Amino acid sequence: MKLTLLGTGCPVASAKRFGPAQLIQDQEHTVLIDCGSGVTQRLLGAGCNGAQLDAIFITHLHSDHIVDLFQLIISSWHQGRDRPQRIFGPKGTQHHIEQLMALWQQEVVHRTEYEQRPSTSALSVEVEEIQQGSIITIGSIDVTAVEVDHSFYHALGFVIESGGKKMVFSGDTRPCSALERAALGADLLLHEVFIHNAFKADFIIRTEQTIANVAAYHTLSSDVGKVAQRAGVGTLVLTHFVPPGCDLKQLHQEVSRDYSGSIVMGSDLLSIEV
Ligand SMILES: [Zn+2]
Ligand SMILES: [Zn+2]
């Protein structure tokens, strides 16, 4: 299967790193994980589009992971999609999407009445809430949900298996033993990272307390290599760079002190065959 990183950023806007989103493709099926800012443009950059998606999985309801969900739904319709989007996410996803579709209801009514496109199926959404241990099968791709530790925020990571290969996505989490167990022996671990030494308090955007609070629900660059080493994964791919602009050479050196496997610094539109 092929993993393409569509967005490797975080809530901080960046011209290089769009919001979190990942594309998984095997011979026949296409799965999207998260819908961060710019996901529809990045899908096109990856040679895909929203009309082709078989399922969308949401790690959690923080805005950076779902902010372009409606844009994805409406643009998929413009791209000729003729079936509802299937969305799987944690508790609260159903409510969020009901509210989202209600917010845009007038837009949908006006467009469908005026534009008279052959199908409106793409504007329907099928939502299924999932939890720790849920296994969803999309063709030959199995996706298993793992509850991770994003502090007070309910969040999921995912184990993705196809053709005898296994990838694990952390979503947003601080170091999490359940995720580590799920990642044991995985071919690839895609993990978020918080680069602690890249931040300085300035008393306008962030105080020392802000930095400490944000760091406390992410995985520090001084910890992420230890997680990968304990799990014994083949390759560690870093994503969700907080902040999006950081010294990658320094980060690589820091992580490689703890992890002896292959380290990939994720970048938007990077594809990896697993
Ligand atoms: Zn995030
Ligand atoms: Zn988050």
Image (tube, rainbow, N blue to C red):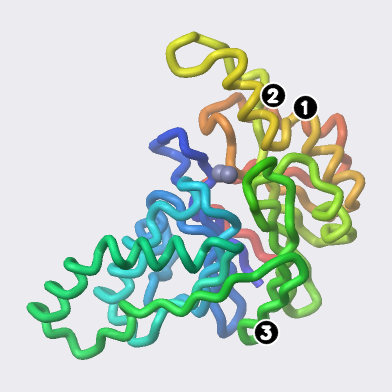
Q: Which residue is mark 1?
A: 254
Which residue does the numbered mark 2 point to in the structure image?
250
Task: Determine the secondary structure under disc 1.
Answer: helix
Q: Quadrant of residue 68?
A: bottom left
Q: Which residue is mark 3?
A: 140
Q: What residue is at 58 percent from the left and 54 percent from the top?
A: 60
Q: Earlier in the sequence, mark 3 or mark 2?
A: 3
Q: What amino acid type should be assigned to the residue bearing mark 1?
A: Glu
The single residue placed furthest to the bottom in the displayed view is 118
Decide if residue 262 is on the left or right side of residue 113.
right
Name the residue type under label 2: Gln
Label count reads 3
For residue 198, the mark is none
| Quadrant in which residue 8 is drawn | top right
What residue do we see at 69% from left, 72% from top? 143
Q: Residue furthest left?
A: 114
Give me the C-alpha separation between circle 3 and circle 1.
37 Å
